[in-house]
Each structure stands twice: as C-alpha cells, then as structure tokens.
Image (tube, helix red, strand yellow):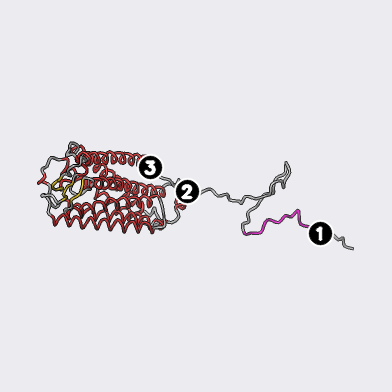
Amino acid sequence: MAPRRGGGGSYSSSYGDDNPWSDTVLLSIGPYQSKSLFIAEFAFDILSLLAFVAFLIWACTIRNRSLALKGAICALTSFICSQTSLVVLEAMFIAEAEVTMYYLICLMLTDFFKLAAMCLTLYVFWELIHRFLSLTRPSGKPHVAVTTIHYVFLGIIFLVSLVEWGLCVAYYVRSVNSNYDLSWTLTQVSCAVYIIHWVLSTEILAWVIFLAVKAGNNAFASKLPAMALITSAISWCAVCATVAIIGIRYSLMPVYQYDRPMYLSTATSIVEFILWVGTYTGILLCCAKWHNLGDERKYAAPQYQPQYPVAQFPPGQFREGQYPPIQQQSYGVAPYPDHLAQPQAHPHHVSPH
C-alpha cells in the first residue's frame, strides 16, 4: 500500500534540534529494485488514480442514490485520497527528494484511506446482494440471518483494520527513533487482514453466483444488473486473492530480500489496476442499470383486494339500529327484475252473452 518502505536512502540529522521528526532523510529507490520498474509502477498508480476519479464522476451522475451507490461514492473518495498520497510519495522517491520525517504522516494517511476504502467496498457488495435477495422473497426483504451475519462480518473487519492501522502508526512513530521492533507484528496483522478480505470476497462471489443463477432462471426482469455484479465480484475476489497470496508467500514465509522478485511490485500494481477497473465498472453498471429490474414492489407478494368496493357514507347519516344499504357489483348484465315492484295486468274473464 505504501511505496517501498525499505527504499529510503541516507539520513542527515538537523543539528541543534532535539526533535527527531525534524531529521531529514533522502528518499531514493532501494538497491533491490530497478528504477525503470519503479517508474512503470508509478505510471500505473497514476492510471489507477485517474480511473478512480472517472468512476467517482460516473457515480455522481447516477440518479438512483441507493445506499450501495452512496457507499461506492465514499469508497471511491477514500481510494482517491489514498492513491493521491501514494503517487506524491512515489514522485518524491523518483526525484530523490530530501524531506523531514514528517513524510511518514503521509504514509499513515495512505494506509488509513486504503483500509477504509476496502471496508466500504465490502459494504457496497453486501448491500447490493441484500437488494437482490429482497427481490426473491415474498416479503420483499432479505432474510434477517443473512443481513445480521454480514453486518457482524463488517464489524469484525472494521475492528481488525483499525488494529492494523494503529500498529502502522505505532510502527512509523517508532521508526523515527530507528526502533523497528513492531515490524513482525505489523506484518502478521496485515497478512491476517489480507486473508480475511480474501475469505469474505469468496463468500461474496458465492452469493453473486447464486443470484446469477436466479437471473438465468428469469427470476428478475433483467439479467444485466446481475451479470454486471458477477463481473465485479470476480474482479474483487481476484484482487483480494492476489494481495493475500503475495503477503503469505513473501511476508509470512521466511525469505531473504533477494528472494523477492524485482518485478513483483510493478506486476502487482498492473494487476491491481486492471482488477479495480473491473470491480468498480461492474458495481457502477449494476447501480446504473438497476431501474431495468422495474418496480421492486412487483416482486413482493400480492396484497389482498376486496371483491366489492367499500361504500362510503358520511357519519351520522344512519341512526342506531339502522344499516347502510348493500352495495352490489355490476357485472355488465341487467339486474333481475323485481316483479313485486312492477304493476301487473290481471286478466278479466268476460262471460259470453
């Protein structure tokens, strides 16, 4: 998430100042990475930033302001903030700028906004799944157990992400004094968060496949929103799996620095760019084409309608013991004749003379 934390160059202290944050450091590309590969990674990070900005503009033009769309707007805003600070830091590494240790605050903000964006993306997926499930139930609402479990998962990942960011802050603060004793703990917690994201993205993909099958059985008026969502879920699961596998292979397992391929960071940026584009293209297309499903009320169970209209009479028209007349429904045929109310001609027998 941050530019090569081990890539910093030489330090030069600020004499006469006891504040270690005022010490300067020369940011430079480390000896274990090619400058051309770093510049290629920088280019794709810029493309990712531009893609997130384009997605945010698209999201703001969608009229159906559902909770899922509002969550997507917040997630894209967080991605833009994280990616902007990342691009600025990478530019300083390329320019070999000399900065004070306050640059670590930018790294803290990068990690914070990235974690927030990941949590918000999970919320967007679950909110869309709940809306689809509500269309398949007669009550018009998703099952309570499903929503409860998803919100519990969201709370867990939020707390774990908060713990990870707290460790990041503590690690950066301690690194000002060249104290890196939290490095292994931070690595373990970060990989745990990656694995949790991978597991939850797989659960989301399973739900979306179920909804795609429903769409294939003509359970919805249009298949396009469900197909867009499954494209998004596949990309989301792939990006989470990529980050988790890299973290397990090159962070949890004991390796040396030279065992990590030089092209790995650049390849990761390229893969993330492609998969994030697929993720948010599907999410926003699903939100934009939601109206193709029609009125959600038509999926609910039909309400009882009385066969005969209810007569309306002003209050006080009938005294106690009196009842309003019975209203009869017209069926398009003439009513039965009332023979008692009609005058009848009685024949007179005339006797012959």
220 vs 317, nearest the viewer: 317
Give the mark, 3 or 1, whose residue is nearer the N terminus: 3
Any part of residue 187 in sight: no
Callout in the foreground (2, 1): 2
The answer to whether 56 appears left or right of 296 in the picture is: left
How busy is the neighbourhood of tag 3: few (under 14 within 10 Å), some, or many (20 plus)? some
How far apart are the two marked residues, 3 and 1, measured between alpha carbons?
A: 82 Å
Callout in the foreground (2, 3): 3
Check disc 2 and give the amino acid type.
Answer: Ala
At which x and y percent is residue 200? 29, 44
Secondary structure under the numbered disc 3 in the rendered image: helix
Which residue is identified by label 3? Answer: 147
Quarter of the figure with residue 227: bottom left
> Which SS does the magenta portion mostly show?
loop
Any part of residue 189 in sight: yes
Callout in the foreground (3, 1): 3
Chain part drawn in magenta: 332-343
**Vertical side of 187 occupied by 303: above or below:** below
How busy is the neighbourhood of tag 1: few (under 14 within 10 Å), some, or many (20 plus)? few
Check disc 1 and give the amino acid type.
Answer: Pro
